[in-house]
Image (spheres, grey):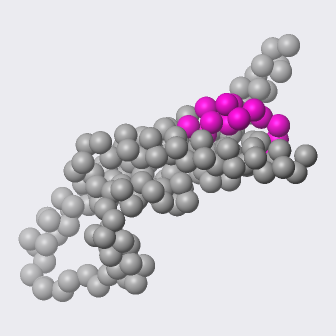
Amino acid sequence: MGESVISIILGYIGWVLMSILKFVITPSLMIAAGYSWWEVIIVTTIGAVIGVLLFYNAGKAIFTWWSKFRANSKRQNTSNKKPKPTKGKRKFILFKDKYGLPGLILISGALSVPISAVLGAKYFRHNKKTPLYLIVAFMCWACFLTFVSWRVKEGIS
């Protein structure tokens, strides 16, 4: 009896970790594995909350440190070379300038929890509600993806 409880808990922990790293596919996999829709929403939301808080705060700390490091190195370096942004970074900057934080929130579920949280920390860390907005966005994505996955499964069976 005790072993089955431990295996159930470990199973949920595995799904939480999966939802942190591969958020967009976790609801479909859980529905296919036979979990109920409310279990899927709870587990993926918990994973998203943990992932957003972990990656947002880590990203914020790294980018704050990097800004201070660059400021110190610029004082010591007298050359006037400016870094050349990559094509991908230019595209994201254009997206960020056009859509801002609401744009990131809308596409967050398609990006992944770590990428969305780190981008939020990089470009919107001065807005104290950014982590909250990302968490709410992932809750909405969890509901949407679970509903779609459940409907597909119901349509197939």
Place of residue 87 in the rendered image (x, y in percent of width and height, measured from the top left) = 40, 84
| Observer-nearest of 30 and 157 | 157
| Observer-nearest of 74 and 55 | 55
Q: Is residue 46 left or right of residue 70?
A: right
The residue at the point 18 percent across, 86 percent down is 81
| Observer-nearest of 76 and 90 | 90
Q: Is residue 107 left or right of residue 74?
A: right
The answer to whether 125 is drawn above or below residue 99 in the figure is above
The residue at the point 52 percent across, 43 percent down is 140
Place of residue 68 in the rendered image (x, y in percent of width and height, measured from the top left) = 18, 59
Q: Is residue 50 visible?
A: yes
Range shown magenta: 32-45
| Observer-nearest of 83 and 105 | 105
Q: Residue furthest right?
A: 157
Asked if the magenta segment contains residue 43, the reply would be yes
Q: Is residue 65 left or right of residue 8?
A: left
The answer to whether 2 is drawn above or below residue 32 in the figure is above
Place of residue 25 in the rendered image (x, y in percent of width and height, measured from the top left) = 68, 53
